Image: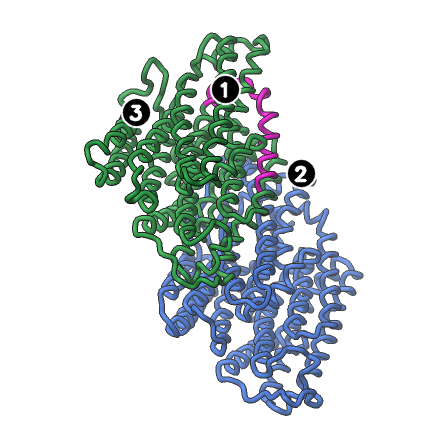
Amino acid sequence: MKGFLLISVLGVVAMLAEIFKLKKILLPLVVLGILAAYVLNFMEWEHPFSISYFENMIAFDKVALAFTGVILITTFFWFILSNSTYDGQPHMVDHFALVLFVVTGAIMLTAFTNMTTLFLGIEIMSIPLYVLAASKKNKINSNEAGFKYLIMGSFASAFLLFGIALIYGATGTFDLNEIRAYIASNPGNMPSFFYAGVIMMLIAMCFKVSAAPFHFWAPDVYHGSPTIITALMSTVVKTAAFAAFMRLFMIGFNGINETWTGILVVVIALSLVISNLTAATQTNVKRMLAYSSISHAAFMLMVILANVRSNLSVNAILYYSLAYSIGSITAFGVLNAVTKYGNENFEEFNGLGKRNPLLALCMTVAMLSLAGIPITAGFFAKYFVFTVMMTTSFKWLLILAVLTSAVGVYYYFKVIIAMYFRSSENEEPVKADMSSMMVIVLTAIITLAIGIVPSVVAEMFTV
Amino acid sequence: MLAGSLIVFPLIAALLVFMAKGKGARNLALGFSILQFALSLVALFQFKHNPASHHLVLNCTWVKTLGINFAVGLDGFAMLMVLLTTFLVPLIIVTSFKNTYDRENIFYGLILLMQMALVGVFMANDGFLFYVFWELALIPIYFICLMWGGENRGKITFKFFVYTLLGSLFMLVGLVYLYNHSISLAGTKSWAIQDLINSGRSLGADQQSIIFWLIFIAFAIKMPIFPFHTWQPDTYVTAPTQGTMLLSGIMAKMGTFGVMKWLLPIVPLGIEKWGGLAIGLSIAGVIYGSCIAIVQKDYKRLIAYSSFAHIGLIGAGILTATAQGLQGAMLQMVAHGINAVGLFLIADILLRHTGTRDIDKLGGIRSMNGNFAVLFLIVMLGAVALPLTNGFPGEFLLINGVFQFSATAAALAGLSVILGAVYMLRSYQAIMLGERKDSNIAFGSLDGSDKAVLIIICAAIIAFGVYPKALTDITEPAVKALMQNLK
């Protein structure tokens, strides 16, 4: 909770920084602030001041704290990485403030216990993102991305609100625990619009996590936005959306699984197939990563589908989001450094193995992790999902996941092949500035480290 | 302690070699690999002395909540395979002395990394650890083939990678199923090999059949067994010589070894039901591979197909689950490992000295270099399994094992010996004997490093042919234990 408050204050400070001529020291200030928030967050783990706040609107239980931790770690790396993009830019201060608000919304989503806080969190997170997506205002792609994101996002929010309203109509409450109690006490005689409300919320959440067939916005938005913003979307925002998804369906709608599991199965199967097959045909690395993020979304959804409300599932989704976020930060960091020299196509990676061996090595680690090859974090992430899925009756989905993972290897390895196998006409070394280099190397090391010793994260909640 | 160091040592060596500069990397890698061989000899001494010694096993917790342990150990099978690996890797490094590779430190580092993963695969006593090493072995060899391979390497190595990865993912699904099932017997979910075996055996025949195929496909692709072999010839030909040696000499044994240690004991009912079909496929591969080898013009491709045929016979022998079959398979795995390295080296020497591997263009090399002709002859005779060479006892026992399963199958498998003699002798004749076909081709004298490797290989071929008991002594107890387990 204290970390959450600190981040929101930090956002306001960043907004005012320009007036007080703090622009020069803003980045160190923000980074230190995030670290402080992380420490505060960590301290609450053992000694919480209180678990729920504001009349049970928000509850920082251990699950929320763990996801907040993941979000803060990724934000920390993101800010250091962003230095190379924003250094000396006139609008840096506004950007920082907006990103901090995104993070505030994201943390709210990990901890809500009330559907109004859910809606607030989603809006606080999304509205700055619409602006950030369109922040390269001279580029038509970026404008398109922002506009598309705004329209699709509002559409999803409308669904969400409609769903909340219907559920309120049936239950008379916004509180997740009370909704669950209502389901438990009225088996079989709930009004049909209650089910409609649940399904509408499911659709809205699928929009937010960009699962097929509600994924159409994602590739264009990811592609059009500035790379650094795409990095934010595919890490912090994704983690938060999943934390919210999990909270909503594992706590709130836990009693009526049969209503939503059928739909979720279709969503997952479609996401796996569409994303992997489309990603394989992309020529643009950023678009490829966008499609691949849909496939990762499907993997995380599988845990929610399994709906064993156990620590095993929480561990699995937590580990998955951390592994995926850290791997993505590395990948986008390298992409950001490489694309300074041209566009974002696979050809830009040609000969990177010679032009900057360290960068190529880190990118290889990230790609191996995203493809799920041992001993990287991505492998354990997939493995945990497998173990959770094994306990359910949807084993065929697992086989589908295995097959599509093999397709995944194809497009991730396209990058590796380009780096080591193809030569480029341009032999000049690729340079990345100190701070990005540091983040890239550090995240690559973390990817390996939590792959070798997964227990540090995977045993957060004892089974 | 000793068991752990067999895995950790090549890892540290690989990291040091990555950091080395220039030619130093090569010598450093050779030095480390010889030390590793010495280490495995110490292990062998310990093993002979006291097979139950606690130095030969290591068991520590890795991920506690999931029941994953870093459990490794040396039984007879593992001991022999580790010895084979540590014996071949220094030889493989020496064969590269006359080739020039750019970024040598990476090349040799990857070879040592590969060695670490291979030793890990052979020693793992924990299902999860086995899978991790299994996958880990794929990454260095992929980069070796990708960065130093020949024409069209991008596509070919990629096919190789996806093929094997897909297979191992199925294996993972099968193993996770066994792991989840183990709770009903062991009380807690466990990855330990004995718990997985118990878990597999408690399943019904239908479930065992599914598990059999999930796991078998991974091994069948790795060996490879017909019809999962399509990645193999191209990859073997495209890979740099050292990569091919690692692939056929050692990595192919991962598959056969896996069947022996991880498939036979786990799904006996599955084997009973589907073993016949799997043996049929293996033998089909033997005949198919041999026939294609006969018509090959490129000598390296010919060996690639012959390697496929030999491995098929090993697979068939293991799947019969007879003592002779298993013992023969172990012998033949060692023999094939040694011979394959020899033959691929010969293909490389031919290319380096004459500029071609095309059998039609070569001829009369014996008159140019008699020493080479003799060494080539011995390696070739080992490959056709002439008595008193190392190929013979293994092949004999294998066919014996297959015979106990079915006389027809044994007759068909026996064709491998005849067909093997056809393509091996014919190619030898064409390359070494007769007149020079192309007067532009000169051969010159052998390089010292090549000569040394060939002499060591020839010595091993004859030594193990005359005295196979040196090898069977190591594996005998393990075969007995496995047969006991299968009953």
- Disc ID at residue B204: 2
**Chain at tag 1:** A
| Mark 2 secondary-structure assignment | loop
Q: Secondary structure at mark 3?
A: loop
The three-letter amino acid code for the residue at tag 3 is: Met
Report the residue at 24% width, 40% height from top. Answer: A28
Q: Nearer the viewer, mark 2 or mark 3?
A: 3
In the picture, the disc for residue B412 is none
Residue furthest to the right: B408
Q: Which quadrant would residue A60 be assigned to in this image?
A: top left
Q: Does A452 sit above or below residue A232? A: below
Q: Quadrant of residue B258?
A: bottom right
Q: Which residues are magenta?
A: A248-276
> How far apart, in angstroms, are the residues tagged by discs 2 and 3?
53 Å
Residue A426 image position (x, y, % from top left): 44, 62
Instruction: Find chain B in the image and tell me its colour.
Output: blue
Compared to B29, does B405 lie above or below? Answer: above
